[in-house]
Image: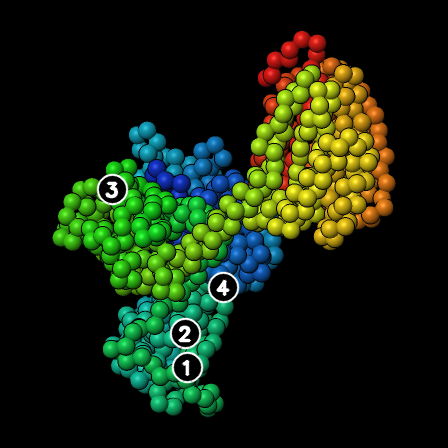
Amino acid sequence: MTGGAGSDPVGRAVLRAMRETGASAGGLYVPADEEPVLRLAVMSGLPAPFLEPWSRVALAAPIPVAVAAREDRLVWVGGQRQLARDFPRTAVAVPYDFSLAAAPVGDGSDARGALLLLWPAGHAPRLSEAERRAVAAACRRLAALLDAGRGPGGTRPRCAAPRVLSVPPVRTVGPDEAQAAAGYLERLPGGCCALDLEGRFTLVTSGAAELLGERADRLIGARPWEILPWLRDPAFEDRYRAAVISRRAVPFTALRPPRQWLTFRMFPDATGLSVWISPSDKDYGPVEPAPTPAEEVPARAGQIYHVLHLAAALTEAVGVQDVVSLVADQIVPAFGAQGMLMYAAEAGRLRTIGHRGYPAEAVAAFEGVALGAAHSPAVRALATGEPSFFTTPGEMERDYPGLPRLTGKAARAVLPLIVSGRPVGCCILAYTQPRTFAQEERQVLTSLAGLIAQALDRARLYDTKEQLAHDLQAALLPHGLPSVPGFAVAARYLPATRGMDIGGDFYDLIRLGDDSVAAVIGDVQGHNAAAAAFMGQARTAVRAYAAAGASPAEVLARTNRLLNALDPELFTSCLYVHIDLRTRRACLAGAGHPPPLLRHPDRHTSVLHIPPGLLLGVEPDARYTATEITLPPRSVLALYTDGLVETPGADPERSVADLAGRLNDAPPVGPERLADLLLEHRRDDADRQDDVALMLLAALPAGPMTPA
């Protein structure tokens, strides 16, 4: 819907925000009903076709308006370079020079949406204090207006499409002055024309019509790249988009067949573009011939950037569920769908890997359907390799009786996911109301299906490798810990959150008879199959020498000599603890491993500074020194790897002291609960770059200890 603000108070508030901040464009996003999505409600300063990729934005998306609403903060982007750094997905889709601010409307407890403002190229790197105050004031006004416009129970007014508000003209003129302006333009050399913000001709001089080779009355109301075949290259539309968004004068040169080169200079403002056309005396060489009406019309620049925007989002997906979540949370809202089904093609059958907005019985009805079946639109799409679009329930009922009633959907796009001619799955976008799919939208969805297919194929390979890595890791770690008289023991392992590699951390608890036990923890250099093999060799060697009765220092020395003889070009840290169960004396020897911690019965925790020793696998003749301590009843010995304490840029000793402080402050609970408490800050770390191993040995009191 396009027009002035009129009696719309929200629209007037957006226009006022633009006026008071000097912004060239502004928009208001509000939460969609019952969806984690922001929808564009009001926009001004940009044409409606520009808004399509941004009309619905997932609240979780890394896009400025979503970040502003989600994190309840002002987001400022001072130019294309910062946009590419902070919001690369947006930068790919809008590769022009401009500045923007996105500000939350309302507070974090009750977000009403976000205000988006754009400034032309050349804005200062930062917002001025006056601009910040104007943005804050605009957000307060909008929040109050949105609150006042809510219906009973706090419901928001519905709006099917964003309202696009036109900016008032700089001034109005009478008939005489308008005629004088037309005469002035006619007298200029070359040709002049005017375009509105949506790129349609609104004025064409006789000189421009002659240069363009078309009657003025046929040009008025049309877009240059739609009516003139030789301007259909998306590059020409892209120049227009660049002028509108950056508000800078933009030139380009085009060849009017057969050999007339023309130079176009576009001068934009808030109401449209003035274009001056002049012949060029330079020959720029041959170009591709323009398509004839019977040929395929090239994709529009807007389509290309829409696909690039979604493609950039797909590059962020790692595993299969990442792909499914991205499609459900960002691609589905972008196309206004109410349902989504994603299938993977496995062993000749369809397997459901994700769905949204579908009843359980509809999902179950097609689970495991053979690819040779005839009653599934997904199977048909994979068999033909062609997408299908059903605009009404009647169309679907004709080809697949009973499907509209089963699914509750009235329209759908069925997109086969094909990679190098091989079907990998199918994606279905469904709508609860009949829907027409325009040709441009079908082209975008078809292109997008290819990108989803590539992302899904990569993700399945990633998941397979990751599962193999995890299986190998599990096989190398103890499946269970033996019981130890007088002690309660807990162990934990957390893999790194980055990559598909195998962790190098290991731990073990070895019974050495009725009266003694050995605890081992280590960290192998690297995160790959070689490191995993080295870990297995180190753990086996320690077990063998411990079982042979070697002292702690000798266990490390012999293991070190063996690992050096194997010459793996790897090394590992290790901490070996021998505990006499009768005396509760512990003998510790370390090889370059972080120091253990001891929480005393009074809950005071100390760092045990044992001789560090050289890493295993570095020097075959290295010697190791043992240290003896006592483990009194109710004490806790903590062994860990550096993944638990290391933070980039932090002092390692400070990090160990912080862990000791957390152990010191933890309540008097059993080792299982205590281990979980110590790992809490690492479990929540979404960017854990190293794996973590932890073993706690709690000396029990004379009576049984009750675990918490």
* 73 versus 177 height, above or below: above
Residue visible at 40% across and 56% down in the picture: 452
Residue behind mark 2 = 236
Q: Secondary structure at mark 4?
A: loop
Label 1: how many Cα within 10 Å (few below 14, some 14–19, many 20+): some
Residue behind mark 4 = 95
Residue behind mark 3 = 365
Q: Is residue 507 visible?
A: yes
> Of callouts 2 and 1, which one flags the residue occurring earlier in the amino acid sequence?
2
Foreground residue, 510 or 532?
Answer: 510
Label 4: how many Cα within 10 Å (few below 14, some 14–19, many 20+): some
Residue behind mark 1 = 254
Q: Secondary structure at mark 2?
A: helix
Residue type at numbered disc 4? Pro
Which quarter of the rendered picture does the C terminus lie within?
top right
Q: Are marks 3 and 4 in contact (CB under 8 Å)?
A: no
Q: Please, which colouring scheme is shown?
A: rainbow
Residue type at numbered disc 3? Ala
